[in-house]
Image (cartoon, rainbow, N blue to C red):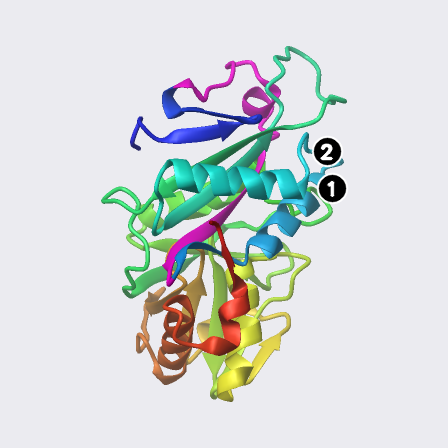
Amino acid sequence: MNSDLLVWLNGELIPRRHATVPILSHGLSRGSAIFDVLGIHSGPNGPVAFRLDDHLKRLIKSAEFLQMELAYTTEEIIDAIKATVKANSIGRGIIKIIAFWSDEVITDLVLDSKLDVAVFAIPESAELVLDKQHSISACVARWRKLHPETVPVGAKACANYLNGYLARKDAISRGFDIGILLGTDGFLAEGSTESVFIVKDGVLMTPPVGRVLSSITRLSVLEAVPKIGLAVLERPVTAGELFAADEMFTVHTGTKVEAVARFEDRQLEAPGPVTARVMKLINDIMQFKDDRFMNWFQPLT
């Protein structure tokens, strides 16, 4: 990543190479950091953020789930995002907000201090490829999704992503792009960093929140597709339904919708007719061609 980029850290814009924490910091050595990621787009009148308010609500909710408190208000973080985007002249890119304890610890687990906050504005590049849609392959990971009674799976916590790391590593070792996690109950959960939708008889289905992360892209699909006459169900999806799906696609921040062309030993039409309609709808929204969803974009100037 470009070392000349400026990072907002606790109220100051500093060079990225100086945005560091001690190795013994609680956020690193205990894995307690939380974060959120959202897209920045080149709007008609300057850079805009995709569903900024929803992302920040989720960041605050992640802190609440873990009984943590950020050192900055939502309004202060919005100002920080605007300042960081402007300082780095970002058009298309992403914002990554990380909240963490920089306090060095040896044995302490629970701290009373408020979380430090860092804001990264990262432009699209050869390293960070965005919006490039291509079909992918997927398998069922041998690992199961974290159970919600062990940790709050709704928190976007760095430590939770070890679960996704293992699923992705398992999938790659078996020749697939992504691994799809089932819950400990055997029902469909999600991918490592993706929400999963299946299509059966023209109807979209995806698991409800509670056992999966409250993805903003997933929410956007749920809210948008009824506008084009597609039926969508938010309900538990069995492993049998997953294997019998007519179509399958994933959604995430970087590339909004990706069709699954191979699932385990099955070849799927990618994109199938329903997935193609979803892809077109979301692409139109992200390219400011659908006035019904312009309120999803917040100016950063």
Decide which of 289, 166 is in the foreground and name it: 289
Q: Which residues are magenta?
A: 18-44
> Is 293 a magenta residue?
no
Q: In the shown orientation, is residue 265 left or right of residue 81? A: left
| Residue matched to label 1 | 64
Toward the viewer: 24 or 235?
24
Q: Residue 45: where, in percent of width, then height?
A: 39, 59
Of the residues shown, which amino acid type is indicated by label 1?
Glu
- The answer to whether the residue labelled 1 contacts the one labelled 2, judged by CB atoms less than 8 Å apart, is yes
Residue 24 colored in magenta in the image? yes
Q: Quadrant of residue 17?
A: top left
Residue 35 in the image: state x and y as whole percent. 56, 39
Q: Secondary structure at mark 1?
A: helix
Residue at 56% from the left image edge and 40% from the top image edge: 79
Q: Identify the residue under disc 2.
A: 68
Q: Is residue 252 left or right of residue 100?
A: left
SS class, disc 2? loop
| The residue positioned farthest toward the left in the image shown | 126
Residue 158 visible in the current orientation: yes
Res. 76 image quadrant:
top right
